[in-house]
Amino acid sequence: MLVIVAPGQGAQSPGFLTPWLEDPTFASRFEWLSTVADLDLAHYGTEADAETIRDTKIAQPLLVATGLIAALELFPHPADAFSQIGAVAGHSVGEIAAAAGARAITAEQAMVLVRERGNAMAAAAATTPTGMTAVLGGDRDEVLAALEAQGLTPANDNGPGQIVAAGTMEQLQGLADNPPAKVRLIPLSVAGAFHTEHMAPAVGHMATLARSVSTHDPRTPLISNRDGQIVHDGREVVARIVGQIARPVRWDLCMETMTDLGVTGMLEMPRRDPGRDRQASAARRRDLRAEDARPARRGPRLRRQARHPVGARRQPHLALARLAVQGHVRPCCRRRGRLAGTREHDRHGALDPGRDRGLRAPRRHDRRVAGRGRRPRVARSAAGAASP
């Protein structure tokens, strides 16, 4: 089973849209969503620096728009996705993109909601200097006790080995001065203590707007990041999007639901910045791995590409994702530069719609092996680490 997930704030990086906007179709669709959001998202995704796109009012619409158009590039006829995708989910603000992908709301409604969400959360964050820090490793009970001692909130629970603390800068500094044993602390590139009581003012504003949003029941099962439950009612989807602004994200429960559903592949739209939180990503991949997963044959290799000038990173290909969805390649590879979990699992790049030339077509042997009924290796990927 394949699921599509959308990362949260913090997945953006300077220039990450440059290869995408080389595709005229992507660029025109992106311009339309930029118009709806009343932001020059193309500029922010190609030319703006890291500090600029760290702003909540910019980062959130930028990521949602990119995720929506990337999914549309993969499925030009959205109805085709409903028979091939087992579920969708979003980490924090990514749940808005997931809701639009499941057709609970339209893309235009998603852009209006994320624009207002970003503005309201930025206003709430400006009241008091707050932030978030990823706590990697350590004993779970000890970590939670340390957060409580500092008055911090476990705003994101991303599974074994990663909890994200959120609170005032003074509280975060207290955690840094007295960390739990055997942990690594990573300050996150976000502008406030999201998913905590500090965001309560934003909830009221969003609740007022949400009453005017027309909804439909999701066409694809949507896994809520509030408690990992599958939501079938469109009104409840929007209500949860509003409520999660001031509630912790339980991505660990989403991963448990995916395991229960028998998920074997995860496709991230858009691919998050690969240089951040590799240890945390590994922890989430281990959490998703099914107990009865067996080793499988390696799939086709991907030819080496010239490094892209932006960030000097190799770019995987949207064509690989298309082949995976069509079932021509197997979600069984483990190493960089090969397909894993029905998407190119390259830690050094993002799916690139403009570089299909280097993809080797799957051999007949690969398709023949895929039909023998062997159990595939579960995908080793997850959505954004910790963000709103």
Image (cartoon, rainbow, N blue to C red):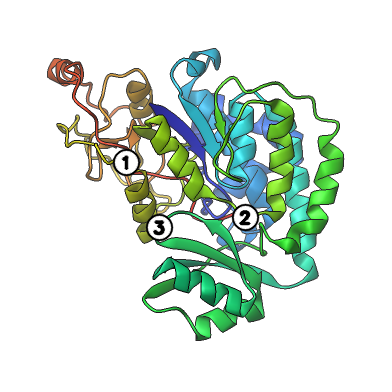
Above or below, 213 relative to 94? above
Residue that label 3 marks: 160
Give the image location of residue 241, x and y in percent.
69, 41
Q: Quadrant of residue 256?
A: top left
Give the image location of residue 232, x and y in percent.
63, 26
Q: Nearer the viewer, residue 38 or 165?
A: 165
Q: Work out which quarter of the rendered image holds the N terminus and state it.
A: top left
**Relative to residue 332, is residue 86 drawn left or right?**
right
Q: Is residue 269 visible?
A: no
Q: Residue at x 74, y 64 (%)?
A: 198
Residue that label 1 marks: 345
Q: Earlier in the sequence, mark 2 or mark 3?
A: 3
Question: For the residue marked with disc 3, what is the amino acid?
Answer: Pro
- Mark 1 and 3 residues: CB-CB less than 8 Å, in contact? no
Label 2 secondary element: loop
**Relative to residue 305, is residue 225 drawn left or right?**
right
Residue 248 — which label? 2
**Relative to residue 381, is residue 169 drawn left or right?**
right
Q: Quadrant of residue 317?
A: top left
Q: Nearer the viewer, residue 333 or 376?
A: 376
User: Mark 2 and mark 3: span between their CA atoms?
Assistant: 16 Å
